[in-house]
Structures are given as C-alpha cells and as structure tokens.
Image (spheres, coloured by chain):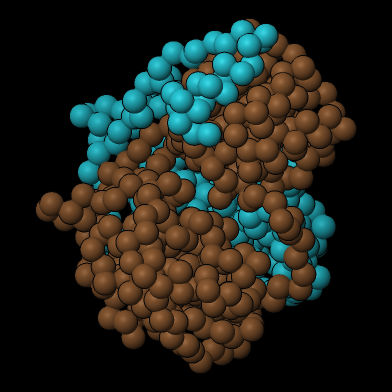
Amino acid sequence: MAILVFVESAEGKIKKTSIEAVAYAHALGGPVTAIALGAVEKAELEALGKYGAQKVLHVADERLSQGIIQAYATVLEKALQDESADLLVLANSSLGTPVAARVATKIGASLASNVVELPKTDGGFVVKRSIYTGKAFAWVELKNQKKVIALRKNAADIKEVGSPAQVTPYSVTLGDADFATKITSSEKATGEVLLPEANIVVSGGRGMKGPEHWGILEELAKTLHAATGCSKPVSDMGWRPHHEHVGQTGVKVAPQLYIAVGISGAIQHLAGVNSSKYIVVINKDPEAPFFKAADYGIVGDAFEIIPKLTEAIKAAK
Amino acid sequence: MKILVCITHVPDTTSKINFTDNNTKFDTTGVQFIIGPYDDYALARAIELKDAIAGTTVTVLNVGPADTEPTLRKGLAIGADDAIRVNAEPTDSFFVASQIAAIAKETPYDLILMGRESIDYNSGVVHGIVAELLGIPSISPVMKLDLDGTKAKLAREIEGGKEYLEVSLPFVAGCQEPIAEWKIPNMRGIMSARTKPLKVVEPKAVDSGVKLQKFELPPPKGSVKMIPADNVPELVNLLKNEAKVL
C-alpha cells in the first residue's frame, strides 16, 4: 500500500514526531513518500530518506511557511491522488490533527487520531488509539480503502534504514478559499525544546512558590536537554505561559521521563502525563497523591534537591 | 447573529474509567457526567458574545441518547436560548460531525463553536470535519475570539506559542482556555432552562468507515521506588542504569 507522510517543520527543521511518522510508515511496508510544505532546509528533507522515505516532495510555496489548515488539506488531497496513496500518516499536533480531519473528509477516508502503535493487519486494519485522556485505549477498525491516521508521540521507533532521498519539487494550484484564514502574527519560543516533542520534561507546580524560582528547573531542563512544563495553577496564576500547562485541559505529554517538582498530582494533571514512560516525583509532602503514579520518588525540599540533581546528572555524563 | 455551540456529555475529569460487556461498553456505574470542559469554554464565550452583540441567539447541540438531556439543560441554564439533541449514540467523530453539519445546513449559523476535543474520545477532529462538510474555515485550538462585524480576530495555540489569525464569518472554532471563564448557572438560569425549547431530531444515516472493536485499560502501575533525600546521585544511577532514560 502506497503511503504518504505529511512532515511538519519548525525553524526549517523537520519535527521529531514527523520523523516518527516516516518510521511508522516504513514499518508498515510502504512505499513511502514524504511531503513537506513551506521553508525547510534541503539537508533535512534529504535525511528523511534515511528513516524510510523513498521519495520526498517539497512544496516551496512561501505562503505555506505558515500552517494554513485549509491550504495544507488541499495540497495533501492532491498529493495523495498523484502518488496513488491510500494511506496518509502524520503526527498529532495543533496543525496535523485539524489537517487530518479535513483531508479525511475530502477523500472519504477512515480517520483515526491519537494512534499509539502500529496497526494489527491480520484481518482488517485495526489501530490502537489513546482515549479518556490517556486513561484507556480503544482498538478501532479502519474499514475504508483510504485511511488517514494521526500519531501520538512515540508511536514508532526512529531507525536509520536507508540513505538520503532525492527531493522533488511539487506544486499545487491554490485558490482564495484555501487562504480564507490569514495568520497575522505569531509568538513562539525559539531555541527551546518544545514540550510535545521532548524526550524529557521537567515540570513545576505550586510547590515552587513563585515564578522567580524557576531558574533551578530551567537549569535542570537544560542539563537534560528537556522541555519545561507546569501544572494548571501555575499557568492560571501566570507564573508560566499557557503552552507549558501539562494536564487534562493542557498539553498531554508522552516523554521517556517526566520529572514533577512540587506538584501534588491532581487527577487532572495525571491525565496529561500518564503516557510518560517513567515518572519521577519530588515533593516535600510524603502524602502527595502523585507518588502513587510515580516510578521513583524523593520526599524533600525541591530547593535543595533540584540543584543536587542537576549536579549529579552533570557528573554522570 | 446565530451561534451554534456543540457540547459533549462526558465523564467528569476525576472519573475512574472501567468497561463492561467484555470491554466493549463504557461502565457508567458511579460516573458523574458533565459538559466537556473544552465545550464549556466554547459555551461561555458564546454567551459573552450574546451579551455583547444585540440580537444574538445561542443554540446548544448534543448528539446523544435521551439520558444526555440534563447536560443540554445545563447548557440552557448557563444561558443558551434553545437546544437540539440528535437522538443517537455518538459512536465516532465522523458520525457526530455529519449530524452537526446536517443541522447547520438546514439552519445556517454565523459561528459554530465547540471544544478543541472531547475528553472521552480525544479525537480533536470534529470541528475540522464539520467545517469541511460545510465548506467553511476551521480553526483550533482557539484561545481568544473577538468579533468586529463579520470579521473575527483569533488566537490559536501552537506548540511553544501562539498564532494570531483573521477570518470572516461563518467558520468553525475548536475552543480551549482561556477563551472565557466557565459560567456557573444561577438559580434563575436553572429555572428558565426547564421551559426553554429542546428539540429532538433523528440522526441521518452515515457510514463513517470506522468500527470500535474493544476497549483496553493500561497495565497497572508498579509501586514507586523511594530514594532518600540525602542520596540524590542514587536517583541518577537508577534513571541511567535501571530505567535507561538518561
């Protein structure tokens, strides 16, 4: 089955979750064509070949350097047709998921988002989705010949399986309707590890006592090449920006390691972190409910423990 | 202006999730149902717009069986003018979106709001499907929405930041905090909700191309390993050599 993979980029670099999508498509058997839109570095596009893309299409339309949902959906619909691909794979994201919805509707595909692992293909095509905000899974059969699947982080392991691919310029005629939504400006943290992409997340809660104390968490995060997150009260009080809020109504993360500092572990916070592989909880209250969801815990004062932890990690490197 | 707010009837965020019938049905025993938290933000913003713009009406819509009506009544108590219930199990995103689009084709709305995702199936695709079926723009997740005549200015959350957008009515928005503060119904609202119109419509047939096979719960978490506060390097050792995540 020919597969098209939509890859997203940030600051010219392909996102890690998109490389996972290429790896996922390769593991399914391919042939795999990757498609990128807007400004992306050429070496980054070629490198997709190493992870399993036989072919890389690049739409170098400047207007698409901004993620316009409708325009992206139009491009992907045409590319699926041109590549005779029956399956579109992409990463769940603020752009990928809405685009998946529109493309699936355009082409009459079976759609599943939040997919966590490779499908079962003995008798049908059955995917495993995360539901109830990480508290359960659903096995869903995608019955139509055409399918669109949006992957949660860590749905596939990235492996080097090939050599750099040729990049083919690709273009689609877009109309005014595709640009009905205009992006006027954006604010974006640059140079930081993005929370949904991060392998390690360091999160702080009310126990940090104020935004002025975040320096020690940032230092720990920098040492671990981790992203920083926070609990809902912390973002509600404006100590940290909203895009760092991890939990039921914030970002759901699925890192290898989640380090929670001064977070008691309300069920709404756990909903955002329960897909983490390992959880470390540091809290001065031994009764904090978060310890029940943790793999490793330390009871003690964060202001003493965090600098020691940073130091010990540096020493162990 | 006519605003349609699509709400979900979902288990309270503190619910324990269990399944029955050989893992094919959600176990509602002891579960409190609420308006989806993201939908609640969408509804709150719709009511604010109604209060600000004369002649605005707000309709709440839910796709669900009769036992979801208290959730719609709560929407009316919060301030919606009327309610529509599509009488069907909300089996999947495409099915639900098709029902919403069918209602909106019959009665055009200037603005269709809903949560960025439901907290039961977490698909985050219904707004996009509705918009595609209606041939109008969709924007999600929206954290700010202001109207100036038929033009809207929005802020959308993206990974690591925000994006500011402009779009003309009509469009569909998937909402999240901090678009508005949740509204708690007052006694007058609750009383008046009892007599506000709630229309029940039968679903249209849709082949959504997906079929649920079964649910599964994650394996239970092993017990936590506690490390003394005076031995922080031991934590690093365990993360490196036992968990192998460093």
Which shade is chain A?
brown
Name the foreground residue: A60 vs A52.
Answer: A52
Give residue A98's position: percent from left, percent from top.
51, 63
Placement of A124 over or under B107, stated as above or below: above
Which residue corresponds to the image point at 33% horizontal and 47% vertical from the top-left? A117
Which residue corresponds to the image point at 46% horizontal and 69% vertical from the top-left? A47
Name the foreground residue: B193 vs B19.
Answer: B19
Placement of B49 over or under B80, stated as above or below: below
> Which residue lies most toward the right here?
A212
Give residue A270's position: percent from left, percent from top.
55, 28
Give residue A241's position: percent from left, percent from top.
76, 45
Tally the numbered discs: 0
For the question of whether residue B204 can be seen, the reply is: no
From the rendered image, report the letter of the chain displayed in cyan: B
Placement of A222 over or under B45, stated as above or below: above
Please give left or right for residue A295 compared with residue B91 in the image.
right
Which residue corresponds to the image point at 29% horizontal and 36% vertical from the top-left? B215
> Which residue lies most toward the left here?
A123
Which residue corresponds to the image point at 81% horizontal and 70% vertical from the top-left? B148
Please give left or right for residue A170 compared with residue A229 in the image.
left
Placement of A257 over or under B200, stated as above or below: above
Give residue A183's position: percent from left, percent from top.
71, 73
Name the foreground residue: B167 vs B109.
Answer: B167
| Image quadrant where residue B1 sits | bottom right
For the question of whether residue B221 can be seen, the reply is: yes
Name the foreground residue: A296 vs B49.
Answer: A296
